[in-house]
């Protein structure tokens, strides 16, 4: 019995060792290598990938004043200096699984295999480990999220050729390749892949994925109107709640850019209803005022005024008053809108894009009122803060140059009008006007003198305080 048990054990070990070889292509060898690659190497790689993906999403900070990127990874390419990154461990595990468990030996040919389509397709395959496709995709995706887009595109191109008999695998690889090209700025190549996929037919399981990739391509190509229906489909397909909310915010921005204010207002409302982080909720409320379609403006203004009184919005008062001004403008209340935009500019602490947008809104109002002397400093202030890539930069730059020249002439005209009016007055009236001007100049000089004396006193006190601290008395 002991001898027989030993023989059986030896036979089992022999069979197991035989199945471990990648040179054998049998049902047992395929099962063994698929099982081992899945639960040993791939599992560790996928766990590392998921952790890195979460860090990427949590670490990304959106600028809600500007149009959002559809995917956070799009912001990495500009900062990328070298290859590699946080997804390197997933890449290492994928490569290891492929190296150790790839089965490329052809299976035994059955009689008449050339006349059997299934047998013929089987012989044309390049990979016989049924799970290894997951490892290949993990490798390409890890390279992609490392922002090594050129390397990722090469990997996905290889996958499409390597699994040419697998329609779904080819479509998946092609979609990732199109995304890689779009991130590289190769829009023609990306469009070519997407168009060919559409012509040749997209597997049903990949249609929503196609919509997501195509929406991203269209947005990057500045085709916002065409991107909207694809983005809506992508939102429905997105499983990650945080990413889905970001995409709804982006949808609102696209609607607003196309002048579809009602739909934009609704989209930003969906963002607020999704209970997002406070910064995103705050931004969505501000964006809603830019596309306010009318209705109960009083209720909206009360809500914004309540936000202005909140301590957590102290650093964002410029945006709150800007939003209040937007609502007043929607009601054609220009006077209160001007007051609100002025308050926004005065309360701005960051002197960045938010302040520039307030100055731009105020400048546009003054320009329409032909108050060119008031409009000129608004456009000049906005121009210094706007990035050259901003959609309004060229218009503001042109307007600012025009106003710089125009104000010189309008001020000269006003001066001549004032002098002529003064000349037509009687001497007592003229002296009274001149007296008021002199009094105002004296008052301004006295206020400036008091301010300078107060500043000097405070500086002196500060210096004395510093001296006491140094001596320890």
Image (cartoon, rainbow, N blue to C red):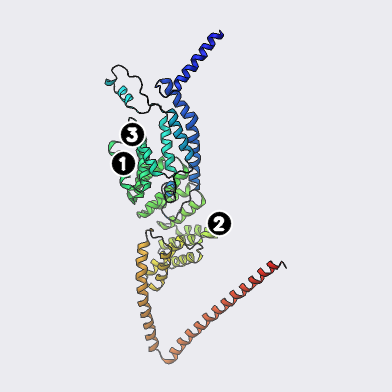
Using the image, determine if residue 16 lies above or below residue 50.
Answer: above
Q: Secondary structure at mark 3?
A: helix
Q: Position of residue 155 (x, y in %)?
A: 38, 38
- The x and y percentages for residue 275 are 50, 47
Which element type, helix, strand or loop, lies under badge 2? helix
> What is the C-alpha distance between the residues marked 1 and 2?
48 Å
320 shown above or below 15? below
Of the two numbered discs 1 and 2 on the same chain, state the one appearing first in sequence: 1
Q: Nearer the viewer, residue 60 or 334?
A: 60
The quadrant where residue 149 appears = top left
Q: Residue furthest bottom?
A: 427
Residue count near mark 1 (Cα–Cα under 10 Å), binned few <14, some 14–19, many ≥20: some
Q: Quadrant of the N terminus?
A: top right
Q: Is residue 371 visible?
A: no
Q: Is residue 56 left or right of residue 109?
A: right
Asked whether residue 113 is in view, the answer is yes
Single out the mark in the foreground, 2 or 3. 3
From the top left corner, tell me how far across and down residue 308 is, in percent: 52, 60
Q: Residues within 10 Å of mark 3 (few under 14, many from 20)?
A: some
Closer to us: 430 or 104: 104
What is the number of the mark on residue 161?
3
Q: Where does residue 375 sit, x and y in percent of width and height?
A: 40, 70
Q: Nearer the viewer, mark 1 or mark 2?
A: 1
Determine the secondary structure under disc 1: helix
- Per the model, the C-alpha gap separating discs 3 and 1 is 14 Å
Residue under numbered circle 1: 193
Q: Disc 2 or 3, which lies upstream in sequence?
A: 3
Quote the CA–CA distance across marks 2 and 3.
55 Å
Q: Which mark is residue 312?
A: 2
Report whether 450 appears left or right of 411. Answer: right
Label 2: how many Cα within 10 Å (few below 14, some 14–19, many 20+): few
């Amino acid at each position: 019995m002991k001898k027989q048990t030993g023989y059986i054990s030896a036979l089992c070990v022999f069979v197991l060792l035989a199945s471990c070889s990648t040179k054998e292509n049998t049902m047992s060898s395929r099962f063994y290598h698929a099982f081992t690659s899945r639960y040993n190497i791939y599992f560790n790689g996928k766990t590392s990938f998921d952790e890195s993906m979460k860090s990427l999403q949590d670490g990304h900070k959106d600028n809600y004043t500007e149009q959002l990127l559809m995917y956070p990874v799009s912001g990495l390419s500009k900062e990328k200096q070298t290859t590699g990154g946080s997804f390197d461990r997933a890449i290492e595990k994928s490569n290891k699984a492929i190296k150790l468990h790839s089965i490329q030996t052809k299976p035994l040919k059955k009689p008449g295999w050339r006349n059997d389509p299934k047998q013929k397709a089987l012989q044309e395959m390049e990979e016989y480990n049924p799970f290894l496709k997951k490892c290949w995709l993990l490798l390409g995706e890890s390279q992609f999220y490392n922002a090594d887009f050129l390397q990722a595109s090469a990997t996905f191109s290889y996958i499409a050729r390597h699994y040419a008999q697998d329609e779904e695998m080819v479509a998946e690889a092609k979609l990732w390749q199109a995304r890689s090209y779009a991130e590289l700025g190769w829009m023609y190549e990306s469009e070519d892949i997407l168009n060919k996929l559409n012509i040749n037919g997209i597997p049903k399981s990949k249609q929503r994925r196609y919509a997501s990739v195509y929406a991203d391509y269209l947005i990057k190509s500045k085709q916002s109107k065409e991107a909207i229906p694809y983005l809506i489909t992508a939102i429905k397909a997105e499983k990650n709640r945080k990413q889905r909310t970001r995409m709804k915010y982006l949808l609102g921005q696209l609607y607003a850019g196309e002048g579809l204010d009602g739909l934009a207002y609704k989209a930003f409302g969906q963002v607020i209803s999704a209970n997002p982080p406070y910064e995103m909720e705050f931004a969505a409320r501000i964006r809603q005022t830019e596309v306010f379609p009318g209705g109960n403006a009083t209720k909206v203004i009360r809500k914004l005024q309540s936000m202005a009184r909140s301590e957590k919005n102290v650093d964002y008062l410029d945006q709150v008053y800007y939003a209040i001004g937007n609502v007043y403008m929607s009601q054609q209340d220009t006077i209160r809108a001007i007051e609100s935009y002025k308050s926004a500019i005065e309360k701005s602490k960051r002197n960045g894009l938010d302040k520039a947008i307030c100055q731009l809104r105020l400048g546009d109002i003054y320009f329409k009122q032909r108050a060119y002397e008031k409009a000129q400093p608004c456009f000049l202030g906005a121009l210094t803060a706007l990035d050259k890539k901003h959609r309004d930069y060229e218009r503001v730059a042109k307007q600012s140059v025009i106003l710089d020249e125009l104000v010189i002439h309008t001020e000269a005209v006003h001066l001549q009008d004032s002098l002529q009016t003064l000349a037509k007055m009687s001497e007592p009236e003229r002296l009274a006007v001149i007296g008021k001007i002199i009094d105002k100049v004296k008052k301004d000089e006295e206020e400036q003198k008091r301010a300078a004396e107060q500043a000097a006193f405070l500086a002196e006190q500060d210096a004395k305080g510093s001296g006491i601290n140094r001596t320890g008395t």
